[in-house]
Amino acid sequence: MRLLVTGGAGFIGSNFIHHMISSYSDYEIINLDALTYAGNLENLTSIQDNPKYTFIKGDITDRKLVDTIFQMSPDYVIHFAAESHVDRSILDPGIFVQTNVTGTQVLLEAARKYNIKKFVHVSTDEVYGTLGETGLFSENTPLSPNSPYSASKAGADMLVRAYHETYGINVNITRCSNNYGPYQFPEKLIPLMIANAFEEKPLPVYGDGLNVRDWLHVEDHCRAIDLVLHAGRSGEIYNVGGKNERTNLQIVKAILQELNKPESLISFVQDRPGHDRRYAIDAQKITTELSWRPQFTFESGIRSTINWYLNHKDWWNRIRSGTYREYYMTQYANR
Ligand code: NAD
Ligand code: DAU
């Protein structure tokens, strides 16, 4: 079995590749990643010499390159590659449309041409928009994205659906809630707050800090994608979430407590424009159909994640100091 993973040098993609390599010794993995600021080959150092693993530096919007890669006959595509940060999408929406919408269409077109067995599109709960104080997102909740990021992901979802309906491609879409865990780029809430708290820098909390996210450990998300890949019904959407709703303030306080740092480090800053108030997932479908269950509680997951960041200070220090880019380019040039 040969898998083409896009965006495998990012946070979830690299965790997924580690998960698949350790779970299926006979699978081959091709990782196509452009190594944007978020792509980091250091996430994959331990498997870089594995003969079952191939890295290709390239852009999913590059039709010619994508066509060449599909000539390597992957059986399955697991599509993670994306611009993924909401704040960056507010500053510069164009690249989000280019990568997330056009890039997905380029991959779908190749999947159609080369009769790929299945295309798994890794989407997000943010396509559903925002919830009030009650209710959950189900797979039938209408799409109502509020940021350029989520709008671009919703656009990609619609294309995946259209390629299934029009051309009969075997697809699945997963829509997961907020992930946390090892290798998450420290622009996102949890790693940013861990690093700042450790360095006793201010912890910037947007608005009143009462926005709610539904947190899931990245390894539980990877297990869900694995199940969808192998057993998801053609054309179906699967929501993934761990029933771990927390306000941002609760998260930040938990991190400070774990690191034994004072709450006076919390600094309330201007809110994110269009800031979604609450996300919460109904994961009944994947639980019932595919017997998926998260293995981490939030308490065990956040503790192990904090420990991971404390044990990998060099990893995030290189990113935060900017030297990581140079390092990865050298790494790549030597391969
Ligand atoms: P990330 O930003 O950490 O990684 C994205 C990866 O994609 C990087 O390695 C980057 O180099 C690569 N990439 C970007 N543009 C590319 C291009 N044009 N061509 C090839 N590669 C490119 O993102 P993540 O947090 O790991 O998210 C992965 C996927 O999961 C995304 O599609 C995201 O929408 C989705 N998702 C993320 C979360 C979350 O909480 N992080 C939750 C649900 C869904
Ligand atoms: O829900 C899934 C989504 O989760 C994914 O699709 C996105 O790729 C991923 O980035 C994430 O989006 P969020 O916007 O929810 O994540 P972020 O870590 O940026 O922010 C989480 C919450 O924390 C959000 O309410 C904004 C707030 N926040 C974030 C940062 C970076 C702060 O209060 N301060 C901050 O400095």
Image (spheres, helix red, strand yellow):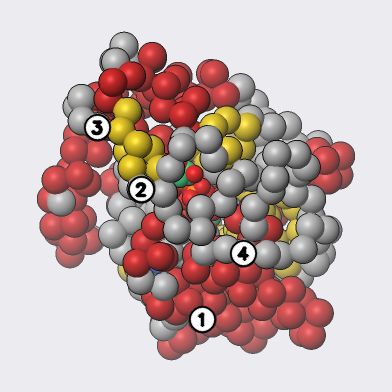
Mark 2 neighbour density, 10 Å: few (under 14) some (14–19) many (20 or more): few
Is ligand 2 within 8 Å of the beta carbon of the residue shown at mark 3? Answer: no
Disc 2 to disc 4: CB gap under 8 Å: no
Residue at image mark 1: 102
Q: Position of residue 35 (x, y in %)?
A: 31, 63
Mark 1 neighbour density, 10 Å: few (under 14) some (14–19) many (20 or more): many
Image quarter (top left, top right, bottom left or bottom right) of the N terminus: bottom right
Residue at image mark 4: 145
Write the residue at 42% across / 53% down.
272
Write the residue at 62% across / 44% down.
278
Left or right relative to 269: residue 85: right
Marks 2 and 3, how far apart in space? 14 Å
Residue at image mark 2: 270
Residue 72 visible in the shown view: no
Closer to viewer: mark 2 or mark 3: 2
Marks 1 and 4, how far apart in space? 18 Å
Mark 3 neighbour density, 10 Å: few (under 14) some (14–19) many (20 or more): some
Q: Secondary structure at mark 3?
A: loop
Three-letter residue code for mark 3: Pro
Left or right relative to 304: residue 151: right
Q: Secondary structure at mark 4?
A: loop
Write the residue at 58% across / 81% down.
105
